[in-house]
Image (tube, rainbow, N blue to C red):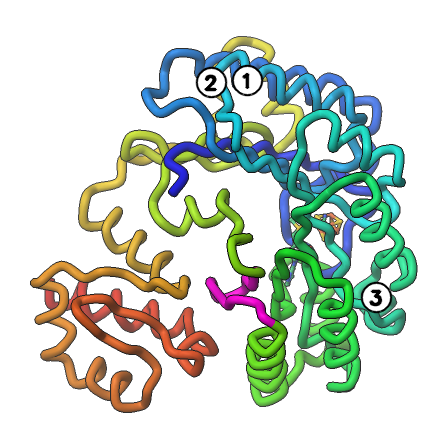
């Protein structure tokens, strides 16, 4: 299990997708170089301050990290290696969008040391991609995958979205069939969330966009769980499916309480029981780093019960579940609501290990809220 990971947020995107609420910026190409320098400077300020090193995982997330030049990615990786060290087997992931990298760029990224690629394909149906406001089509998404394979990437994740308004069930089935035919090592499936502040949310408030019904959403999720299971993928976290041995180590660290440093705009860190999160506006972030200040928007020391509950919440989202402490088991077992969840086959409790069942995965958030409420109420 990884004990120390590095997240690098690259906030630049070719355009803002109408459903996306991440901290991203379009344009600003003249600031890429300055941003890369700032990220390297921020990393260097951590030299000698974290007992946990070398790095076991590195994740370039976004945004669209594939917009940067390979030489810029290389500089960030060299700085990470010089500051913290990187293990020989480290998993080094980069998120990419179709049409932001061609075969030669993928080859250059591979040569930099990126050994895992996460491609945001979203759908293999042109009509769905149009609804999602994406600028690439399904053929381009497939071509990006083929180019990544040709460049030597042997560990590839594909992100897809279901519950796209107006899309017939057959579209989701066809997208999943294409996924299986392409046989990536890892698949992430996300139910479309209508996030406040996005164009999709505005359209919903104006009555111009109707979310998919709960019944259709549950169907899509259940269907993909069953289909990917039959195709040999392990469903190891609410949204994550992997071929044997191919779980995302970086994310696995997040879900299991590993320490991580996040650098760049809005990045979060968890180090030695303290969490901090970085500024979101680009000028403020650049100004702070360039003037030698910590670019933090806030920080908090996690008190032990809060840290324990947060870990339980995250672990519960994985196939391994969470091992309860004796007091927790007793508290839950004495609660009628918990007994009802056991009887409804939403959760299993075996030898102190609390796990979601496949039916429970459908209601992971609600069950997590309920379990924590029961522990907090009676704790
Ligand atoms: C940080 S994004 C980066 C990926 C890359 N920029 C792209 O769009 O191809 C990671 C993934 O989050 C998912 N995502 C983003 N917004 C979402 C939303 N509102 N609902 C569901 N999934 C979402 C998409 O599948 C996306 O690929
Ligand atoms: S979905 Fe990806 S490409 Fe689109 S705005 Fe969000 S991070 Fe950028």
Query: Where 225 falls versus 308 (above or below)?
Result: below
Nearest the viewer among 229 and 281 is 229
Looking at the image, the residue that sits furthest to the top is 291
Circle number at residue 81: 1
Residues at circles 2 and 1 in contact by the CB criterion of under 8 Å: yes
Is the CB atom of the residue marked by disc 2 within 8 angstroms of ligand 1's nearest atom? no
Graded by Cα atoms within 10 Å as few (under 14), some (14 to 19) or many (20 or more), the crowding at tag 3 reads some
- Decide if residue 291 is in sight here: yes
Local secondary structure at mark 1: helix
Quadrant where the image shows the N terminus: top left
Membership of 160 in magenta stretch: no
Q: What residue is at 25 percent from the left and 84 percent from the top? A: 342
**Left or right of 101 in this view: 262:** left
Local secondary structure at mark 3: helix
Q: x, y percentage for residue 314?
A: 37, 57
Query: Where 182 falls versus 305 (above or below)?
Result: below
Local secondary structure at mark 2: helix
Circle number at residue 84: 2
**Left or right of 103 in this view: 262:** left
Residue with the mark numbered 3: 129
- Decide if residue 288 is in sight here: no
* Main SS of residues in magenta: strand
Q: Nearer the N terminus, badge 3 or badge 2? A: 2
Graded by Cα atoms within 10 Å as few (under 14), some (14 to 19) or many (20 or more), the crowding at tag 1 reads some
């Amino acid at each position: 299990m990884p004990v120390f990971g590095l997240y690098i947020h690259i906030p630049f995107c070719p355009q803002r997708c109408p459903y996306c609420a991440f901290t991203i910026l379009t344009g600003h190409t003249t600031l890429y170089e300055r941003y890369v320098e700032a990220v390297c400077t921020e990393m260097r300020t951590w030299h000698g301050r974290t007992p946990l090193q070398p790095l076991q995982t590195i994740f370039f997330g976004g945004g669209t990290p594939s917009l940067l030049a390979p030489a810029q990615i290389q500089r960030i990786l060299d700085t990470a290696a010089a500051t913290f060290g990187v293990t020989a087997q480290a998993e080094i992931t980069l998120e990419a969008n179709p049409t932001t990298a061609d075969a030669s760029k993928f080859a250059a990224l591979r040569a930099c040391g990126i050994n895992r690629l996460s491609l945001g394909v979203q759908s293999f149906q042109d009509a769905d991609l149009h609804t999602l406001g994406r600028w690439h089509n399904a053929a381009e998404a497939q071509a990006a995958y083929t180019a990544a394979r040709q460049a030597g990437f042997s560990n590839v994740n594909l992100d897809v979205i279901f519950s796209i308004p107006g899309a017939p069930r057959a579209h989701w089935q066809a997208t999943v069939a294409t996924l299986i035919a392409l046989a990536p090592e890892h698949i992430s499936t996300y139910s479309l969330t209508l996030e406040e502040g996005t164009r999709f949310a505005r359209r919903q408030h104006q009555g111009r966009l109707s979310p998919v019904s709960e019944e259709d959403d549950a169907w899509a999720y259940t269907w993909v769980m069953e289909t990917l299971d039959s195709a040999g993928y392990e469903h190891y976290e609410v949204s994550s499916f992997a071929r044997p041995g191919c779980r995302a180590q970086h994310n696995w660290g997040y879900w299991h309480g590993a320490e991580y440093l996040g650098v760049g705009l809005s990045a979060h860190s968890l180090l030695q029981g303290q969490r901090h999160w970085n500024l979101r506006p680009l000028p403020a972030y650049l100004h702070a780093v360039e003037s030698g200040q910590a670019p933090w928007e806030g920080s908090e020391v996690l008190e032990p019960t809060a840290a324990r509950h947060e870990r339980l919440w995250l672990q519960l989202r994985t196939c391994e579940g969470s091992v309860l402490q004796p007091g927790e088991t007793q508290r839950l077992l004495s609660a009628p609501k918990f007994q009802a969840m056991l009887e409804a086959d939403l959760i299993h409790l075996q030898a102190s290990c609390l796990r979601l069942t496949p039916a429970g995965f459908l209601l992971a958030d609600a069950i997590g809220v309920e379990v924590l409420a029961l522990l907090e109420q009676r704790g």
